[in-house]
Image (tube, grey):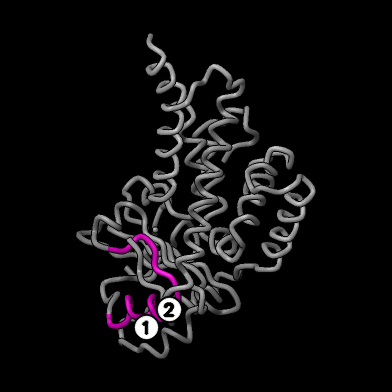
């Protein structure tokens, strides 16, 4: 087997893990795929003879690519916001079962992604790599361009912020917020929608929803309110993964689910899910027939 074929085989074996790292850092499956693809391009141009730990090398490359993307994203946010076209590892040298990764990713869900979005790029990378993927700080330090102690402080600050932002856990309260959102959306009540949305609300859509014409990521209360005002007439209250949300059905089949994250009675995140496999895994249940 030729060198390139061997590299490709090893990379494919690590792809699921690398995408998990990138998704947790970027919060966008499309951007995560872009970061992983960039890692492959860099690997294909690199002399791997001096690489002792390929999994660790790939994790480092993906993390650095993600950091650059996060910094670029932060820089772009200095301009007026416009709708844009919106899985884990234990240590760099440890292989993780893809099914376990999927379970862990779903257990963290949109709620954590919304909180992570409040962190600086360096804080987010340090927290994700250490607290979610158990990478030691001496390996994180060169990725974020800091000393190990400074990287530890970045993760510590991020951890305090994550713990200080707690999504609503009361299903009845969540249901009231979602129902009010649905009523305001159907009625075209823009003011009511704004009142229900956190100013920094983030809407993310999976790849299938994007193919249906939805932007992969929309940020800010006004932009999200504009998207929903006067719409969602076909949506129905539902349990999405056991959490209050909305669902759109056709001929008895769920075409799209709307997952909501709420905090202090405000919608902080909305996830549009249209991938059939994910919808089946979530077990979407409509509540009013």
Q: Is mark 2 on a helix, strand or loop?
A: helix
Q: Residue at x 56, y 36 (%)?
A: 59
Q: Position of residue 246 (x, y in %)?
A: 38, 68
Frontmost residue, 162 versus 50: 50
- Can you say whether 76 is above or below 188 in the image? above
The range drawn in magenta is 214-230
* Occupied quadrant, residue 139: top right
Q: Name the residue under label 2.
A: 179
Say above or below: 2 vs 269. above
Q: What percent of the width, then of the height, locates residue 101?
A: 53, 39
* Residue depicted at x 39% and y 75%: 224
Residue 230 visible: yes
- Asked if residue 192 lies left or right of residue 151, the reply is left
Q: Quadrant of the N terminus?
A: top left
Q: Distance between the residues labelled 1 and 2?
A: 6 Å
Query: Which residue occupies the foreground of this view, 173 or 119?
Result: 119
Nearer-the-camera pick, 244 or 77: 77
Residue that sits furthest to the top in the current view:
1
Q: Indicate the quadrant containing the C terminus: top left, top right, bottom left or bottom right.
A: bottom left
Drawn side of residue 112 relative to residue 186, left or right? right
10 Å crowding of disc 1: few (<14), some (14-19), many (20+):
some
The spot of residue 37 in percent (x, y) is 40, 38
Q: Mark 1 points at which residue?
A: 183
Kindly identify which numbered label has been placed on residue 22. Answer: none
For residue 254, say whether it is visible. no
């Amino acid at each position: 087997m030729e060198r390139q074929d061997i590299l490709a085989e090893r990379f494919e074996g690590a792809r699921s893990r690398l995408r998990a790292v990138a998704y947790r850092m970027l919060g966008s499956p499309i951007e995560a795929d872009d970061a992983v693809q960039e890692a492959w391009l860099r690997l294909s141009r690199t002399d791997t003879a001096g690489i002792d730990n390929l999994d660790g090398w790939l994790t480092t490359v993906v993390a650095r690519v993600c950091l650059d993307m996060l910094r670029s994203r932060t820089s772009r946010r200095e301009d007026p916001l416009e709708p844009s076209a919106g899985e884990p590892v234990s240590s760099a040298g440890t292989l993780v079962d893809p099914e376990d990764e999927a379970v862990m990713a779903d257990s963290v869900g949109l709620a954590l992604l919304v909180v992570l979005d409040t962190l600086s790029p360096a804080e987010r990378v340090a927290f994700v790599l250490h607290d979610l993927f158990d990478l030691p700080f001496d390996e994180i330090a060169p990725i974020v361009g800091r000393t190990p102690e400074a990287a530890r402080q970045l993760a510590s600050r991020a951890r305090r912020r994550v713990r200080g932002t707690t999504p609503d856990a009361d299903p009845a309260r969540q249901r009231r917020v979602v129902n009010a959102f649905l009523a305001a959306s159907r009625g075209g009540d823009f003011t009511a929608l704004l009142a229900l949305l956190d100013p920094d609300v983030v809407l993310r859509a999976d790849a299938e929803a994007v193919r249906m014409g939805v932007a992969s990521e929309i940020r800010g209360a006004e932009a999200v309110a504009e998207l929903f005002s006067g719409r969602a007439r076909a949506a129905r209250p539902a349990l999405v993964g056991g959490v209050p949300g909305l669902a759109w059905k056709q001929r008895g089949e769920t075409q799209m689910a709307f997952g909501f994250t709420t905090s202090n009675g405000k919608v902080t995140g909305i996830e549009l899910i249209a991938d059939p496999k994910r919808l089946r895994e979530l077990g979407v249940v409509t509540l009013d027939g």
